[in-house]
Structures are given as structure tokens and as C-alpha cells.
Amino acid sequence: MKETVLKRILKVLIVVCILLVYLSLMMSDIVTYASSDTGEENVIFEAYFENENGERVSQIEKSINSEDIRLHIKVEVKNEGYLNGQLELRNANFKFKQEEIEGVNEITDNTIALKQINAGETLDIQVGLEVNLQEEVDLANFNQENSIVLTGSYKNAMQKESSIEKENKIKVALTAPYSEEEEKVKLDTRIITNKIYNINGENKRIIQIAIISGLEKEGYPIGQTKINVQAPEGAEEVTVQERGTQATNGKDEWENDVESLKSEQNENELNIEINNIQKDGKIYYGEGKQDKIIVTYVYAENMQLAGEIKTKASIQIYDEYGTILEKEVANAITEESDEIIGYQITNEQNIYKGKMYAKEEQEYKSITSIDIRYPGIEQNIKLNEGYAVYRQEVEGEVHEEESKLVYKTSLINKEELLKVIGDNGELVIKKTDGTEISKINKEKIDTEETDWIKVTYPENQSEIMIEINNAQNTGTINLLNQKAIKQEILDRNTLKMYSNIVVKGTLQQTGNINGRDIESNISLQDTQTKAKLDLYFI
């Protein structure tokens, strides 16, 4: 009997032990599973492109001006839990397009904030990419590997939180945007001066050609621009003036030096070389910019000139092949022209009529540009500007009515001005009765603490006189004007009829210069305000 009881107890103990071992193993598996259920194991992240065959690839080639770059992104949460995360671009040569995408809270240039992704859910999206290159760029950026990183917080079924960071490598190799059939080089040329002038007591014929060059499309940075000009033989003097080489190296006209701009004359052939020099491993990248050059030829008075001036631009871009793009144009030497002093008022700023209807002062900006294109051609250059009219053409008939525009302030760059007037010249701004408002010379420039000289005008100063006396060098002087429209007379219906204000200026006749009048247009809008202010060259 005792033996039977003992056997039964032993059997029970054996069963209990087996059960304990089994339960222990089960609990161990459960703990192991729970402890491994983190974001690293449970979140899947992929970023890729699709090639022309629909295959997934990590790198593609695209034209630098492409607007159809699409990145595929897939984020999946397996098993259980949920993810709150965001995607981030790092060291990228592109940025995200601002789009509305299901499953996404917000897109910025470099981040995508995701909505919560729960267990069993997959976020599968496409997002557009835009090329994103700075004005100073490392050449490696055109063919670099980029990182897109998923970061965020994952919580499993037990609400245990873990941070995740998963990275995918992708690459967009940026290529030149040109096809064989397209115009690649922008080259505009014009003979701006062809006239006999008295220079130091002698009559000389001066011919000047203005040259604008650059790329027709936004493309690779320009490594070097070469401009070849062929003119009639017999020139006594040939000079090159730059008016800014923004397309090639980003320099304003007073910034260039012999290293970045060189020229060489060989008989009737002139060669100009503009270089984009690497600095600290970076080069300048100017989208949509232009190089602006004036070439001056001085001939004897009795020189009979005919034929044409041929200009060729050869632009080498910074692609891996050192590609050279070329264009050639020709200008016939025909009628005389006198633009040895360039003068224009740039007023391309559309104005909203709301304040004008309320007879309130409406401020706007303009630029007065005076370009001296031959040194010492005239000791005293005089201009009048500011008179303005409302203008509208109806059925071929032009209607005009006087408008009152007043000057508030003008800003003048010290370095730009000093380059032109030198040590002995001066810029004088006066009222129309001759009363001096401001006189700027080297002494005044030296006393100014900022890079800009500010001229403040008397109240209600609607017209001004500008004098440049004894300018020592060639170059452009720009007055950046803050002006205001005073609309105190016209009733609403009359004002509504007019869609433009025309501002007038006059370059006065002097011994060497023919006088001429110029006009600049301000567009008046009823519904919206748009502001665009450009400084044109020719």
C-alpha cells in the first residue's frame, strides 16, 4: 500500500516537473519574442527610383533642369505596434517638392513628416524632387550619393518605445540639359556707338559693340567663356570693358581682376577669356545669369569702315566631358549711333491701385543707370529725370495726364561710384532750379562708414538733375531710388481708365554727346500687386 502511494506521488512529481519545464520554455519564447519586437526589426524602409523598364534602382541620371524626378518611398510596420516618424534628406543635391500626399502630414525642402503607421499598414508614396544647388557648389554635388533617413518613435504592443533610424542611399547624377537640335548658347550683340568724337583735340571714330553671353538654359556651371571678336582692320586702340560676368563667375563689374578676365588683341582679332576659378574646392554656379562686355575700337576720322563685326562665344561647361558650346553672330556696320553714354530708368514694378484710389501715397522702387563707356569723352554729363504722366491708348488715340512721382531716397554703391569718378570726379544731385541736394566725391566716400551712400530728398521732390563731372574711368553708376506716387487729383473713374505711368528722362546735349530722351513704364493693376525689378544692359 505504502509502495503504491509512493509511486503515485513520484508520478505526480514527474508530471509537475515536466509541466514546469514546458511552461518555462514557453515563457522564455514569449519573453524572447517580446524583447525582440522593436522598431529595428519591425519597421521596413525602402527608398528607390524606377528606371525606364520599371525596375527598382538606387541611382538614376537626369538632366539638371528636370522636373519629373520621382522618388519612391515605402515604410511598413509588421506584426504589431505603430510608428510615428519622418524622412530626412542629408547631403543631397535635390530637395522635396511641396506636394499634398496621402499619409503625409507635411513636406519641407528636406523633411517629410509621416502620419502614424499602424501594424499591418504600408505607406507607399511617390514624391517629386527638385535640383537644389547653391551659388557656390562643390563639383561633386553634380554626381553624388545622397542619404534619405527614416527616424522616429516605434511602440510595440506592450507600449514599449524604441527609437529608430534607418538609412537608404540614393543617387541622382545630374547631366547637361541640351539636345542636339537646341540653341545652347545665348549670344546677343549690338553696335551701340558709331560716331566721330573729339578726343583730346583730335577727331576719332569710335565704334562700340555690346555683347551679352550665357547659357540658354539653366545648366552646368560655366568653367570658361571665350569670346572672339573680329572687326575691320586699322584700329588705333582696342579696349574691353566688363559690365559684370555673372554667368561665368558671378562677379559684378567692379569686382573683376586679371585672373578671371583676360583679353588679347592680334591684328583685327580680339580674344576675351572669362574664367570661373575654383576656390576652396568650390566653383560659382549662376543660373540664368549673363556676361556683359563692351568692346571699343578707335579709328582715324577718315577711316572708311564697312562690312561687319563678327562675334563668337565658346562656353566650356563643368561637366565630366569638358563640353564646349558655341555660337556666332555678325553685326553690319551701317548707320551712325551715339550711345557712348548709356542712360535708362528701370521701373518694371507693377503697382496696385488700391492706395491710389484712396488718395494715399504709394511707394515703389526704381533704378537710374548711367553707363560711361569711354573715359574722358565728356567732362560734364547732365541728366534730367522724374517728369511723369498717366498714359493710356484707346482705339489708336493716346491719352495722357500729368502724374506726380516724388523721390524719397537714393542709395549709391561706394565702390561702384568710386571706380567711375576716381579721385577727382564727382556726382552731384540738384533740384531743377540748380539748388544742390547732394555732392558725392572721393572725400565724402571715404567718410562714409557703410558700403552705400544714402541721399535723402526734400519733401515732394518730383524732378531732379544729375551731373557727373570729370569722371576718370568707364563704368556704370546706379541710383537705387525709393519713390512714391502721390495721387491727389484724379477721381476714381478717371484713374481707372489709366493702366500705365510713364517716367521720362533726358540726357542733355553737350559738345561730344547728342541729347536724347528716354521713357520707362510702370504698369498699374486693379487686382493684385506684382513686383519685379531688373537692371537691363542694352
Image: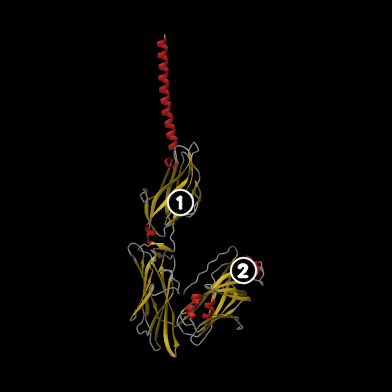
* Residue 441 visible, this angle: no
Q: Residues within 10 Å of mark 1 (few under 14, many from 20)?
A: some
Q: Nearer the viewer, residue 140 or 10?
A: 10
Tell me where residue 222 sits by quadrant: bottom left
Tell me where residue 193 sits by quadrant: bottom left
Q: Which residue is mark 1?
A: 88
Q: Which mark is residue 161?
A: none
Locate residue 100, reporting x and y percent.
50, 50
* Residue 352 visible, this angle: yes
Locate residue 227, reporting x and y percent.
37, 73
What kind of residue is marked 1? Glu
Give the quadrant of the N terminus.
Answer: top left
SS label for mark 1: strand
From this view, report whether residue 250 is shown above or below residue 168: below
CA separation, marks 1 and 2? Answer: 44 Å
* Number of numbered callouts drawn: 2
Q: Residue at x 40, y 22 (%)?
A: 18
Q: Which residue is mark 2?
A: 362
Q: Nearer the viewer, residue 292 or 437?
A: 437
What kind of residue is marked 2? Gln
Tell me where residue 92 sits by quadrant: bottom left
From this view, report whether residue 481 is shown above or below residue 110: below
Q: Nearer the viewer, residue 414 or 446?
A: 446
Q: Residues within 10 Å of mark 2 (few under 14, many from 20)?
A: some
Q: Earlier in the sequence, mark 1 or mark 2?
A: 1
Q: Nearer the viewer, mark 1 or mark 2?
A: 1
Locate residue 151, reporting x and y percent.
46, 47
Locate residue 209, reporting x and y percent.
42, 78
